[in-house]
Amino acid sequence: MHKNSIWITGCNGKMGSELMKLLKGNTDYRVVGTSLDVDVTDEHAVEQAIDLYMPQIVINCAGVSDAAYCEKHQLEAYKVNALGARNLAMASRRKNARIIHFSSDDVFSGEHNRPKTEFDNPTPRTVYGKSKLAGENFVRELNPKHLIIRSSWVYGLEEKAESPSGFYQQVIDHGLKGEAFTAPIDVIGTPTSVLELGRFFMKILKSNEYGIFHASCEGGCTRYGYARAVLELNGLDTNLVSETLQEKDGLLVSTQLENLMMKMTGIYEMPQWKDAMRAYVEQNRIGGK
Ligand SMILES: NC(=O)c1ccc[n+]([C@@H]2O[C@H](COP(=O)([O-])OP(=O)(O)OC[C@H]3O[C@@H](n4cnc5c(N)ncnc54)[C@H](OP(=O)(O)O)[C@@H]3O)[C@@H](O)[C@H]2O)c1
């Protein structure tokens, strides 16, 4: 049995593919990635896979992360985000393996315009947020060797523009086509580069930390501010985006996270979101102006 054997689920997604890249090039680890070939909602398939791969660490990047899709497909959302997490938590516990589970800022309702710490009580209001919290709870209850990483507005290379969670890529597409579009000014969060999340992840992977960690870039902005920054930093026309309101009741929704555990343990320091985006753009230049 290899000392640092890792199984990554959801390995073709934004997070999963970045972690595969980071870990495959690292000789300290032997990594196997699965996607829909091991359906995490199928308890038997998960049990078979863990017997085959014998990992010391299971990293769960499988999920349904499109919030609007989750509203319309509640059963599927809970099946993948909650039951899938449960199956992986049970299987990893049976093998005495550590589980690292990716979760979301959407476990918070968005009320109160202040960043939420790991010690704030989650009160999700969407199906996506509720299903992610249910997944977290299964992981916490079923495997004591757990690490739950909550992040927000993650953008990265494997982003699909057709998915609403692929906001960064949608903005690029509008910019390249010269198409006008709108973005909300009443929704606040923190764009987080998958590169920074990956760097934090490598630090925590090598540590003995357990529990819940928030991991988003520092600072925050509206969706509109996010869109403007993507256009500006990629040399595209910032006038293409105009302001809109998303919430019907006039409330401000803020799911900004405070990385309190990260700061207390000193494990990593996340950069300001716009600095991280600038660095991401440098690495992934598109053909703007
Ligand atoms: N993106 C964000 O802004 C963000 C922020 C915070 C937290 N998260 C969480 O982080 C995790 C990873 O996010 P991501 O952005 O990498 O998502 P993603 O790009 O949508 O990737 C999710 C992956 O899970 C796979 N998957 C879906 N159903 C599955 C099933 N039943 N069995 C096995 N694999 C399945 C998908 O496969 P297909 O592509 O083939 O469907 C996809 O490769 C998710 O749990 C998400 O909730 C994401």
Image (cartoon, grey):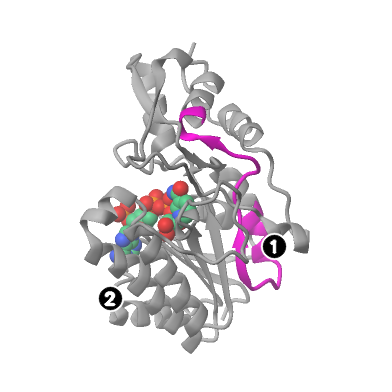
Q: Quadrant of residue 131?
A: bottom left
Q: What element does badge 1 sit on?
A: helix
Q: Which mark is residue 117?
A: none
Please name the amino acid that badge 2 sits on: Asp
Residue 222 within the magenta-colored segment of the rendering? yes
The x and y percentages for residue 256 are 56, 48
Relative vertical location of residue 142 with respect to residue 234 in this rendering, above or below: below
Extreme-bottom residue of the structure: 94
Relative vertical location of residue 205 with respect to residue 56 in this rendering, above or below: above
Residue 13 within the magenta-colored segment of the rendering? no
Please name the amino acid that badge 1 sits on: Met
Q: Is the C-beta of the residue carrying label 2 under 8 Å from the nearest atom of ligand 1?
A: yes
Horizontal side of residue 172 vs 222, given as left or right? left
The x and y percentages for residue 208 are 70, 73
Count of all numbered marks drawn on residues in the image: 2
Horizontal side of residue 88 vs 114, given as left or right? left
The residue beneath circle 1 is 261
Q: Where's ligand 1: which quadrant?
A: bottom left
Q: What element does badge 2 sit on?
A: loop
The x and y percentages for residue 127 are 32, 60
Q: Residue at x 28, y 69 (%)?
A: 79
Q: Nearer the viewer, residue 33 or 125?
A: 125
What stretch of residues is rendered in magenta?
200-225
Relative vertical location of residue 157 with respect to residue 26 in this rendering, above or below: above
Q: CA distance from mark 2 to mark 1?
A: 33 Å
The x and y percentages for residue 195 are 58, 44
Residue 16 in sight from this viewpoint: no
Q: Quadrant of residue 121?
A: bottom right
Horizontal side of residue 18 vs 11, given as left or right? right
Whether tag 2 and tag 1 are in contact, CB under 8 A, the answer is no
Q: Residue at x 33, y 50 (%)?
A: 66
Q: Which mark is residue 42?
A: 2
